[in-house]
Amino acid sequence: MRTGHGMAKRTVGFIGLGIMGVPMATNLVRAGFDVVVWARSPAAVEELVAEGARAADDVAGVFSAAETVILMLRDEPAVDAVLARGTGTFAGLVAGRTVVQMGTFTTAFSRALADEVAAAGGRYVEAPVSGSRGPAIEGKLVGMLAGEADVVAEVEPVIAAMCAQTFRCGDVPAALSMKLAVNTFLITMVTGLAETFHFAARSGADPEVLREVLAAGPMASVVSRGKAQKLADDDLTAQAAIVDVLKNARLAEDAATAAGSAHPLITASRELFEEAAAAGLGAQDMIGVIAAFAARAEPESAPSI
């Protein structure tokens, strides 16, 4: 990043100001980058402008202002829409630009997008992150990067401003494969934690003592402590929402199927998150999946979840 006397700041575009994108872009501003943003939500743009970012009028405005453009969008159709894939506009946007795709999508989608960006004269890096809103706010995400080595090296300082650590994973789509493996552990671990507290409540074990025992023991982690505390506080505001975790569980399950990998735990977890989402709990934090256990235990007495 060029920030010395008389030197211009490095300009970075950021599109996708959602639950993760707002704090991530904020950390880029605070790290000294000249951040240009666009989003469909005026409130999110205003929040970033208040932090010191610049607002573009549209997607083209972001790409014209910044050589490196980060996409932190919800799903694959959103990426296609923003980049106008399949139209003549696409090549004009990405030519001479580095597109950094930070969402968690299928490896096939990322590989195809990388090929199209390269064919249009652009560069492409996939850089999914591990972590939820809390780590995003604190700048403690874990970044996984894949792409051509020189392009990854150029992008790495930008990603590092939002992360505690970054890891180079190889060529596209190795970073997304890594992220899906990480998500398999995260999702099955939190599902197991929910089952643990459900069992404790049904069997007469004190949930508060259980929380303390787990926090003191060798299995404790930032995630386990945080999710157990949310249960103790009856606080289901989303750090990672059930509906988003369900999407990621499906991605991990599909990737495992494609790889010929056995996946009984992610399948069981996905089914429970589906049940929670179908009961209208999709906006709750992922630990709210505990309600799906309650519904299975007493389906007639728990119609609301």
Image: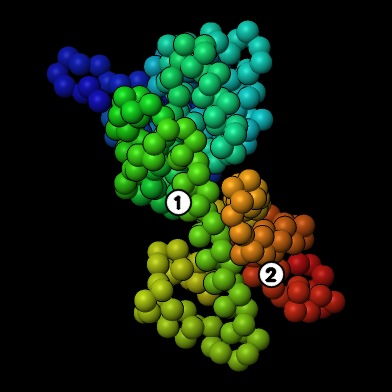
Please report contact status of discs 1 and 2: CB closer than 8 Å, yes or no. Answer: no
Q: Work out whether residue 34 or residue 197 is closer to the camera in this orientation and state it.
A: 197
Q: Work out whether residue 206 or residue 167 is closer to the camera in this orientation and state it.
A: 167
Say which quadrant the N terminus sits in. top left
Residue 207 in view of the camera: yes
Q: Amino acid at mark 1?
A: Gly
As drawn, the residue found furthest toward the front would be: 260
Asked if residue 16 is positioned above or below residue 282 in the image, the reply reads: above
Q: Work out whether residue 16 or residue 79 is closer to the camera in this orientation and state it.
A: 79
Q: Which mark is residue 291?
A: 2
Q: Residue at x 50, y 52 (%)?
A: 181
Asked if residue 11 is positioned above or below residue 135 in the image, the reply reads: above
- Report, in whole angstroms, how far the alpha carbon at label 1 lies from the one at label 2: 23 Å
Q: Residue at x 74, y 62 (%)?
A: 275
| Residue 262 point in image, percent of width and height | 61, 59
| Residue 271 point in image, percent of width and height | 71, 61
Q: Residue at x 39, y 36 (%)?
A: 170
- Helix, strand or loop under label 1: loop
Image quadrant in which you'd find residue 284:
bottom right
| Residue 73 point in image, percent of width and height | 56, 34
Residue 57 in view of the camera: no
Mark 1, other Cα within 10 Å: few <14 / some 14–19 / many ≥20: many
- Helix, strand or loop under label 2: helix
Q: Amino acid at mark 2?
A: Ala
Q: Which mark is residue 131?
A: 1
Say which quadrant the C terminus sits in. bottom right
As drawn, the residue found furthest toward the right would be: 300
Mark 2, other Cα within 10 Å: few <14 / some 14–19 / many ≥20: many
